[in-house]
Image (cartoon, rainbow, N blue to C red):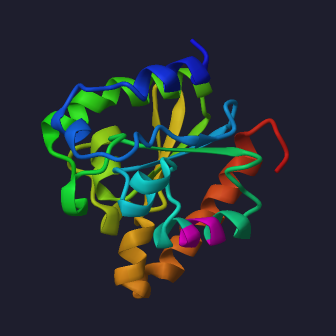
Amino acid sequence: MEIDVLQQQCLACRRCGLCETRTNVVFGMGVPDAEVMFVGEGPGASEDEQGLPFVGRSGQLLNHYLEAIDLSRETNVYIANIVKCRPPQNRDPLPEESQACMPWLRQQFQCIRPKIVVCLGRVAAQQMMDPGFSISRDHGKFFEKQGTLFMATYHPAALLRYPVNKPAVFGDFVNLREKITQICEHTY
């Protein structure tokens, strides 16, 4: 299935209660054949308003980290979330909401076929990598899962609240750059 067709189907989704309070479905954005895919937990207020992932203050911070290692949502990465609709008051998605949305993310993954997935934050890492994943302990480390490399780092919104972790995240992005150089076909 083409990513555009999948997106059109997702825009009409009513699989969970989040559809009742959303302004827009936030499907994802970026290059449809990206070798690197970033996954967050869910859209916030700015994302719900615009229908695009990571466009608020945390998205601006993410863009700075991407630019620092020659990545960009316009040219060589894809960005999505576990849930496609904003949870009220930016709470963590409920298990049933995440379960309802995971098929969309799996299909996005199948369309894009990234070589590296970067989970942004604890919720995404626990959903995609391991329910017991600890960001503070395991951020920046790569784990292979069914032929794809996964890495997690702190969510940009958490960095806005706790800027003391910014140097550690920069180190995670430097590690990501090195891994891209090692395994990706395209030169970035």
Q: Which residue is pictured at 39% across the width and 52% down the height?
A: 48
Q: Image check: 181 left or right of 162?
A: right
Q: Does the magenta stretch include residue 104?
A: no
Residue 60: x and y in percent read: 57, 70
Most extreme residue toward the top is: 1
Is residue 69 left or right of 3 when viewed as pictured? right
In the visual, does 6 lie left or right of 10?
A: right
Q: Which residue is drawn at 36% across and 61% down?
A: 45
Residue 42 percent across, percent down from the top left? 34, 50
Q: How many marks?
A: 0
Work out which residue is located at the far bottom of the displayed protein and give it.
Answer: 164
Between 100 and 159, the one lying in front of the other is 100
Q: Say if 153 sits above or below 18 in the image.
A: below
Q: Depth check: 60 or 8 in front?
A: 8
Q: Can you tell which quarter of the image residue 63 is in?
A: bottom right
| Residue nearest the observer in this picture, 30 or 22 | 22
Residue 111 drawn at (x, y percent): 58, 21
For the point 32% across and 41% down, which residue is it?
83
Could you say where residue 172 lies in the image, as x and y percent from the top left? Answer: 54, 66
Q: Quadrant of residue 136?
A: bottom left
Front-most of residues 154 and 1:
1
Q: Magenta stretch?
A: 60-64
Residue at (33, 63) in percent of width and height: 135
